[in-house]
Image (cartoon, grey):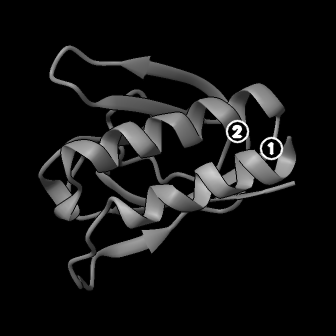
Amino acid sequence: MKKAIGALLSTALLFTSHQASATQVWTAYTTITSVEVITDGGFIVTLASGLPAGCSAAHGIYVQAGPNGVTADGVKALLAEALSAHYLKQTIRYLYDDATQYCYGAYATVTD
């Protein structure tokens, strides 16, 4: 089961495209406290810790198609990764853009 979930989580990286930016930083590994699906097709992941106070998206990472080169398929894959990590109580970290108040997410990695 863990191997299948690991493969699914790794697939999330295949559906995103990375644009180099000096404003992209990683959060610390932490747990997810909530996942809120938004009507525009994106979602907000609220983390237990690890974000600066400047993130206004409910103090979480906002994942949406467009910012940071994330595609619509990338949003779906990252949502599956977030829900899996939350359900399995795994720690996760996100690469996000700290230049905006929305802290748009681009990548995520999960650990046991």
Q: Report whether residue 30 is seen.
A: no
Q: Residue at x 36, y 44 (%)?
A: 55
86 lies left or right of 14 = right
Q: Residue at x 60, y 29 (%)?
A: 83
Disc 2, disc 1: CB below 8 Å? yes
Q: Amino acid under label 2?
A: Ala
Per the rendering, the mark at residue 56 is none
85 lies left or right of 50 = right
Give whichever of discs 2 and 1 has the lower sequence position: 2
Residue 78 percent location from the top left of the image:
45, 45
Between 6 and 62, the one nearer to me in the picture: 6
Residue under label 1, please give it. 90
- Callout 1 environment at 10 Å: few (<14), some (14 to 19), or many (20+)? some
Q: Residue at x 22, y 25 (%)?
A: 41
Which of the 4 quarters of the picture holds residue 49?
A: top right
What whole-number distance in Å separates the C-alpha atoms at marks 2 and 1?
A: 5 Å
Position of residue 70 relative to residue 86, above or below, is: below
Which of the 4 quarters of the picture holds residue 100?
A: bottom left
Label 2: state its secondary structure. Answer: helix
State the quadrant of the N terminus: top right
Residue under label 2, please give it. 85
Q: Amino acid under label 1?
A: Gln
Label 1: state its secondary structure. Answer: loop
Residue 73 percent location from the top left of the image:
28, 45
Position of residue 2 relative to residue 94, above or below, is: above
State the quadrant of the C terminus: bottom right
- Callout 2 environment at 10 Å: few (<14), some (14 to 19), or many (20+)? many
Q: Report whether residue 106 is seen.
A: yes
